[in-house]
Amino acid sequence: MDRLVILGSKGGPAIRTGGPSPTSMLLEVQGRSYVIDCGLGVTRGLVEAGVPLASLATILITHHHSDHNLEFGNLIYTAWVAGLASPVVAYGAKGLARMGELFFDLNRFDIETRIADEGRPDLRRMLTVHEYVEGPVLDDGTVRVTALRNHHPPVVDSFALRFEFNSSAGAPRNIVFSGDTAYLPKLAEFARGADILVHEAMLGDGVDALVARVKNGSRLREHLLASHTMADDVGRIATAAGVGRLVLNHLTPADDPAFGPADWEKAVRTTWAGPLTVARDGLTLLLRDAEPADTPP
């Protein structure tokens, strides 16, 4: 069964006891797996989702903030020690190739020891990196992916991604991931008619509470307001795009017990009347020919 799994639903790199993990997602289509972003916890998330790490094949990184790329190298490495013996192809903005090279250099001793001692293939020859810009990203015969440069200052190379494919049953599907972005009306055109729009979201009252309890609150507020999207504006994008389902993800804040799914729904319902899912770690949307549906928590 084709599915979309939210492996990490939190905006920002910090983790707290009992809280969610930073951003990462899994899309499975016709038996092939695509990992979108590699925030801390992505490897464990894949294992918990029942994905054999040795089957890792394709990774896409939306931009180079640590809550999206911190576990990139560690995911590939852990898959390798779990038996990965086939190539991995990764797609990301400029700098991803160098990140892979530096990670392999950092772990050179262990890589070479395991090659000699355990007979493993050379991990350094198994990774191919493609650095993309706005426009076509990949077409592997199963999915076609296109990128839109979004607005996430100070990061210039930050992208939304649109996946187009036929489901295992042959039905055409479109899923759009916003990446991290400020309110961007042109994203509505990019997401036009998508079955699912996965969009980052902030909660106004939650942001106020967040900045009040951190030392760099004023600077953090400036960044959040300039670089991310409030929930009601996310609803405006989904409505203008006419998507089938809106999934709120990369939640800010995601780990404040004072705010829950009802608060997110209240905020977005002022501008969006369609099917709505508030992400949580491990949430799965089954991509049936009918409307996608949540699996039980």
Image: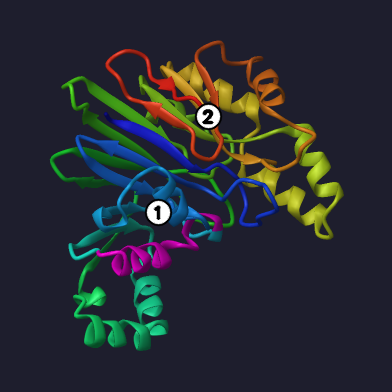
Element under label 1? loop
| Residue 181, quarter of picture | top right
Task: Check if residue 72 falls in the magenta segment.
Answer: yes
Q: Mark 2: which amino acid?
A: Pro
Q: Is residue 232 left or right of residue 249?
A: right
Task: Name the spot of residue 232 as percent of width and height, x first.
Answer: 64, 24
Task: Name the spot of residue 29 as percent of width and height, x first.
Answer: 24, 35
Look at the image and tell me whether residue 209 can be seen.
yes
Distance from disc 1 to disc 2, alpha carbons, whole Å, reads 27 Å
Q: Nearer the viewer, mark 1 or mark 2?
A: 2
What residue would you read off at disc 1? 61
| Disc sitting over residue 114 in the figure | none
Report the front residue among 92 and 256: 256
Task: Name the spot of residue 205 as percent of width and height, x first.
Answer: 79, 33
Q: How is the image coloured?
A: rainbow
- Seen at 40% across and 54% down, the residue is 61
Chain-order first, disc 1 or disc 2: 1
Q: Residues within 10 Å of mark 1 (few under 14, many from 20)?
A: many
What residue would you read off at disc 2? 297
- Seen at 58% across and 57% down, the residue is 154
**Which residue range is magenta in the image?**
67-83
- Seen at 52% across and 24% down, the residue is 237
Report the front residue among 189 and 92: 92
Q: Residues within 10 Å of mark 2 (few under 14, many from 20)?
A: few
